[in-house]
Every structure is written in structure tokens, then in C-alpha cells.
Image (tube, grey):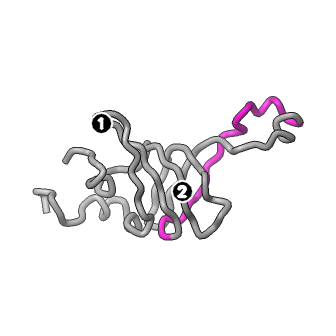
Amino acid sequence: MPLTPATLTRHELIGRPVRVVAASNPDLVGIAGEVVMETTRTLSVEGHEVRSTSERESRPEAGEHGERRVWQVPKGDATFEFTIEGDGQQVVTVEGERLVARPARRTERTGDSKWR
């Protein structure tokens, strides 16, 4: 099955670029990076910590974007934007509630798959 905006939720998410656009916890909004792990209820997103100007001046060794970090983001309480390649680059917005399932089960859901 080809990766399209309609079939994104049926594909593997690990390695895919993602950004949190809405969440019940405001500290999670704006997190961007790559999905490095997925569980039934969370996505682990690895990215750079956003740093303020004063932090950059006090710790220049950490770089412009800060240190790499992994965030645990609850799927059910967030809205995600995934970037997919194809005919150009597309951004797909997905309600996290649609992703709440074991990764293996989520990719097997009935639909257009000829294997079910």
C-alpha cells in the first residue's frame, strides 16, 4: 500500500518527521523532530530543545538549537503534523486519538488491505 495522506495512520511512524501542533499539556506544543519509538499510548519524539537567548549566551557549547532530547508525547491528548515525501512534500495533520493502538494492530486495521 503506498504512503498517502489517507493511509498514513496505517504505516510505520518510526523515522517519520513529526511536529506537535496541539496538546492538552501546553509544554508539548511545538515539539518537532523524528519519531524514534512508538507504544500503544505514546510517541517518542527526538529533536532539539528550543533555547532562549540567555541560555545560548550562558552555554554556547550546546549550539544554537540546544541539546538533543527525546520527549514522550501521549497520543490521545495531542494533534500531530507528519511530513511525507511523494510528489513534493506534504504535511498531514492527524488527531492523536486515531493513533491510539498497538503499532502492529494499528497497521493491520481493516480497510483497503488485501491481507485482511
The percent position of residue 116, horizontal first and vertical second, equals 13, 63
The percent position of residue 31, horizontal first and vertical second, equals 60, 51
Closer to us: 102 or 88: 88
Closer to us: 77 or 14: 77
Give, as a three-letter code, the residue at label 2: Val
Q: Which residue matches tag 2?
A: 21
Label located before the other in sequence (1 or 2): 2
Judging from the image, what secondary structure is the residue with disc 2 in? strand
Which class describes the residues within 10 Å of circle 1: few (<14), some (14-19), or many (20+)? Answer: few
Q: In the current view of this chain or complex, which residue is farthest to the right? A: 58
Residue pictured at 46% horizontal, 61% vertical:
39
Closer to us: 1 or 108: 1
Closer to us: 87 or 67: 87
> Which quadrant would residue 93 be assigned to in this image?
bottom left
**In the image, is residue 64 above or below residue 105?**
above
Q: Is residue 24 left or right of residue 56?
A: left
Identify the disc placed on residue 31: none
Q: Is residue 90 left or right of residue 6?
A: right
Residue at mark 1 to residue at mark 2: CA–CA distance: 22 Å
Residue pictured at 48% horizontal, 65% vertical:
75
**In the image, is residue 103 above or below residue 54?**
below
Asked if the magenta segment contains residue 21, the reply would be no
The percent position of residue 21, horizontal first and vertical second, equals 54, 56
Residue pictured at 24% horizontal, 61% vertical:
108
**In the image, is residue 59 above or below residue 30?**
above
Q: Is residue 51 left or right of residue 30?
A: right
Please report the bounds of the magenta region as a residue range: 58-76
Asked if the magenta segment contains residue 70, the reply would be yes
Residue pictured at 33% horizontal, 57% vertical:
9
Q: Which residue matches tag 1?
A: 86
Judging from the image, what secondary structure is the residue with disc 1 in? strand
Give, as a three-letter code, the residue at label 1: Gly
